[in-house]
Image: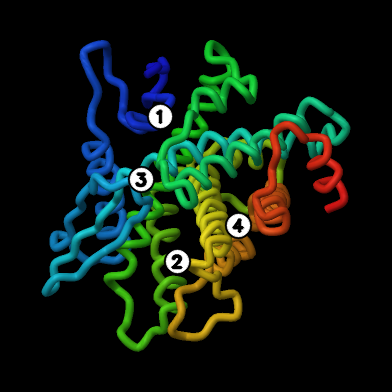
Amino acid sequence: MTIAPYKYLISDSLDNCGNIYINSAGVVNFDTILNFLFDEVKFAFEKEQGKSLDNINIEFIDSPLPYASIQNCFGDYTISFSEGMKKLLYAFSFLCVIGYQYSCFLKVNPKNSKAWEIQLKIFYHIDELLNNFFIRKTYKFDLIAALQDLEICFVHSLQDWSYQAHEVFEGAIRFILSHEVGHIIEESHQSKVQQEENADKVAIQVLTNICTFEKEDSSSPEYLKKLLDSDLYATYKAINFTFFLFMLIDIKQEEMQVYTPCCGMKDDEHPSAEHRSNQLIFSDEFWEFPSHKLFLKWRSSLIYVFAFLKGKIDSTNISGLKEKFEKF
């Protein structure tokens, strides 16, 4: 295991990824971090909704399966968050942050062959990560090897990448917890689709209230720069990347014929991640961000590669994949 000199541990198997590094004496277990993030969510929720959450507990489940859920037992609620979900979110946060940044770079430098190579390698590693969790079911991924393959320097640039990845990692956990909490205020007559949409709306509202950035009616370059550096932008980015991951999970599960994303939904069906993502990415609030088109392009890139190429991403044939991608 390698201990990065940053906020969280990075390991080659993901076994200790997501544990917070304190000093050479030891680490804080993830369940402590999870409870800390949940306390933030509880405080913001109670302030926003005026409703106590004293009847909600959280438990960290030692399961390789990536999931989070809420159960109601006679008016007392328990949110379960699994070890597998922590591992998957952590690795995906790194790969998605790096991929999105290279997507932004290619927008300005579309002919940079090295950037194309790294971007397409990222798709390959995301595919490997998802296959390990949903097809091979090894529940492991060598994040260090992936970062080395992407030529991310462990001395300089990793610090920049890791800061953003950890921001997304924590933001994704906050969103998932807030979403589960949002289910306790749903109305019994709501369909599954409406329940999920409502839980997402509650979660987004709660998380934006945690943010300290104050929006202004301005489009000046100075204001937009402050916006892109703000905790509000980081929150929306984390929520979007979480939806992107869920969309890719839907695609993988469809490949396995275990679950079919319900785009043509009936009222008693769970909405697809794509449907849920659209509720945010096409909202008026999100379109206030100057980078909204880049988010859409990155999402389209992911869906094209995984839905249309069906995961046929060969790291030895990057040039062939580049030709297909450029046609899109």
Determine the residue located farthest toward the front in the rendered image.
136
**Could you say which is closer to the camera, residue 10 or residue 256?**
256
Q: Nearer the viewer, mark 3 or mark 2?
A: 3
Q: Earlier in the sequence, mark 3 or mark 4?
A: 3
Separation (CA) of disc 3 from disc 1: 12 Å
Label 3–label 2 contact, CB within 8 A: no
Disc 4 residue crowd, few under 14, some 14–19, many 20+, Cα 10 Å: some
> Disc 1 marks which residue?
13
> Disc 2 marks which residue?
201
Residue 173 lies left or right of residue 130; in this view the side is left
Separation (CA) of disc 2 from disc 4: 13 Å
Give the colour scheme of this rendering.
Answer: rainbow
Q: In which quarter of the image is residue 212?
A: top left
Q: Give the SS element for disc 4.
A: helix
Separation (CA) of disc 3 from disc 4: 30 Å
**Could you say which is closer to the camera, residue 30 or residue 48?**
30
Tell me which amino acid carries mark 4: Phe
> Disc 3 marks which residue?
84
Determine the residue located farthest toward the bottom in the rendered image.
189
Q: Which of marks 2 and 4 is nearer the N terminus?
A: 2
Q: Earlier in the sequence, mark 2 or mark 1?
A: 1
Q: Which residue is drawn at 47% across and 85% down?
A: 267
Q: In this view, does 182 lie above or below 306?
A: below
Label 3–label 1 contact, CB within 8 A: no
The disc at residue 286 is 4
Q: Which residue is drawn at 43% across and 71% down?
A: 196
